[in-house]
Image (spheres, rainbow, N blue to C red):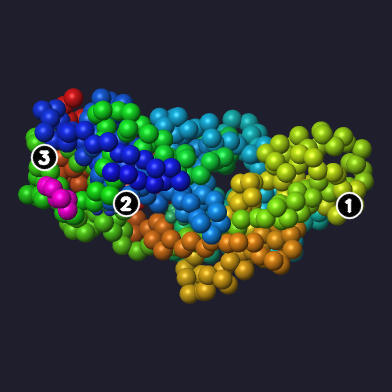
Amino acid sequence: MASQTNGKRWKIIMPPTPHHAREGCVHIIGAGVAGMAAALALREAGRRVVVHEAARFAGGRARSFHDPHLNCTIDNGTHLILAANHAVLSLLDRLGTRTHLKPPPDPAFFLFDRRNGCHITLRIEKVLGPFLRLRWQGSPSSCTPRVNLADYLKSTAALFTTDPQKLAARLEKTGPLWRLFWEPFIIAVLNTPPNQADPAPLRRVLLETFGRGADALLPLLSDVGLSGLLADPFCERAQRDEHFTLRLSHPVRAIETDGHRINALIFDDETIRLNSRDCVILAVPPWTARRLLPAIPAPDRFSPIVNVHFRLSEEHTTRHNAAIIHVTPAKAGVSHHKRMNKWPEIPAFAGMTMHTSCRVSEERAEHVAQRFFGVIDGTAQWIFRRGPLISVTVSAAEALQAQRREDIARACWRDVAAVFNLAEDPMPPVRVIAEKRATFLCTPAQSARRPPADVGFSNLFLAGDWVNTGLPATLESAARSGETAARLAIARTAC
Ligand SMILES: Cc1cc2nc3c(=O)[nH]c(=O)nc-3n(C[C@H](O)[C@H](O)[C@H](O)COP(=O)(O)OP(=O)(O)OC[C@H]3O[C@@H](n4cnc5c(N)ncnc54)[C@H](O)[C@@H]3O)c2cc1C
């Protein structure tokens, strides 16, 4: 069986199906992040594992593919990982790919306000013990938002509610914090409009990020695509390990159960009967889980994320870099090489001559050199840059659903051009990807439908970002649920 991810072809070797073996075996259904995390934790504990994946690639909602139009590998959706995401990081450790994640050279959040063209930097600094200071700085300095202590106190008080509408209404009264922080933060983290967002997972994220100190808040950016980070090393690992079978293009069509235990997994070409030592981890999305086991509660409303990928031409890249190295006369004395070394990840710097005109200030240049931006009041919400690829993310993108792809691309490009000081025409080659069911809609009603990992079957455990981890549907929730399901399966299976 062969599969293709990230342009590579994988040959999946299938040893004799382990259900014939005398030892117990854990069947994992789904090779998304939750299934991968479960599989690797189980192998570490010495359990035999068979992963059945419906698609011809691993990775699920976090994957890359070669786009012939852009002629490069892109992610279905750009994923942000924070230093606080310890389950994701330990998955990457197990896969040996953590080194691909790098904190930005300048550990801060860079925002661009489309209303007034201001660049705003948010630095989160340690003060004493668990206390943090949020330092806002505008460029030009007249853009610096006036946030006072009362706004922070009002924010903290607002979080103690279970009602999304009250939460949004109270946070809206926190002055500039609402526009610059709360609104984009809630939409990004919960993929849900703030006036519908469940406050409980929001509080949990805040505790796990702000509650753990400034370092936990660092965004970690990958120098490879999602499949290079996750699916490809996962497939390689399965190929090397004789007790680890990965069966791609192998969807489970039905599950046979007597209501207490799973008796058999039914595929197109075979039925696997489970012996008394076998376990199943169901790591599929909620809509599939409901189809396979209708008695299990699961979220049933979803929220879209739209990603727009632009491939910059050489001309655009050059203009971008030119925008970065325009300097103010006061700083022009700094040596060219010293300045270039500040942004070593931008390859086109090599051999470029420094412009002597003074279009962009030093602070502004630092902004444009970043790889990750928030856009306030634009169509684009977040912009990620990797080499010539600029990727825009729009979460809770219900409003974009009805729009033509060309119009979405054009609106996002206008935001990108404004941030990077590029011409609006011509728009570079673009790919728009709308994931309609990117995550479940994180409302209190949908949260109440999240089941625990153990739903009362003796040999079945659930995993997936939608299982009740207390976190919103994210990579971290998926990885943590996989680890939990693996722990439960380890306790129930013999080696
Ligand atoms: C566009 C986009 C952007 C996102 N951005 C972020 C972000 O910035 N940060 C973040 O933390 N999270 C982000 N997420 C969310 C994150 O991708 C998901 O939370 C995570 O990937 C879910 O993993 P999972 O394993 O739970 O589910 P899935 O990835 O859905 O995996 C389930 C697997 O089960 C397989 N399957 C389905 N049916 C069957 C069957 N019958 N038999 C066998 N296999 C089956 C599927 O093919 C799939 O591979 C984003 C999601 C999207 C779509």
Res. 59 visible in picture: no
Label the magenta part by its dominant secondary structure. Answer: loop
Q: Is residue 464 left or right of residue 164?
A: left
For label 2, being within 8 Å of ligand 1 is answered yes
Examine the rendered structure and indicate whether residue 207 appears above or below residue 147: above
Estimate the x, y position of residue 337 in percent, counting from the top left.
82, 34
> In the image shown, does 26 or 322 lie closer to the viewer?
322
State the residue in front, 434 or 380: 434
**Which element type, helix, strand or loop, lies under badge 2?**
loop
Segment tinted magenta in the rendering: 266-271
Ranked by sequence position, the earlier of labels 3 and 1 is 3
- Amino acid type, residue under disc 1 in the picture: Cys
* Quadrant of image for the N terminus: top left
Vertical placement of residue 460 versus 315, above or below? above
Q: CA distance from mark 3 to mark 2?
A: 23 Å
Q: Are marks 3 and 1 in contact (CB under 8 Å)?
A: no
> Could you say which is closer to the camera, residue 143 or residue 79?
79
Say whether residue 409 is left or right of residue 202. Answer: right
Residue for badge 1: 358
Q: What amino acid type is highlighted by mark number 2?
A: Ala
What is the distance, in whole Å, between disc 2 and disc 1 at their CAs? Answer: 52 Å
Residue marked by disc 3: 274
Q: Is residue 446 left or right of residue 423?
A: left
Q: Nearer the viewer, mark 3 or mark 2?
A: 2
Residue 55 is tagged as: 2
Disc 3 is placed on an element classified as loop
Q: Compared with residue 209, is residue 176 higher up or lower down, i.e. above or below?
A: below
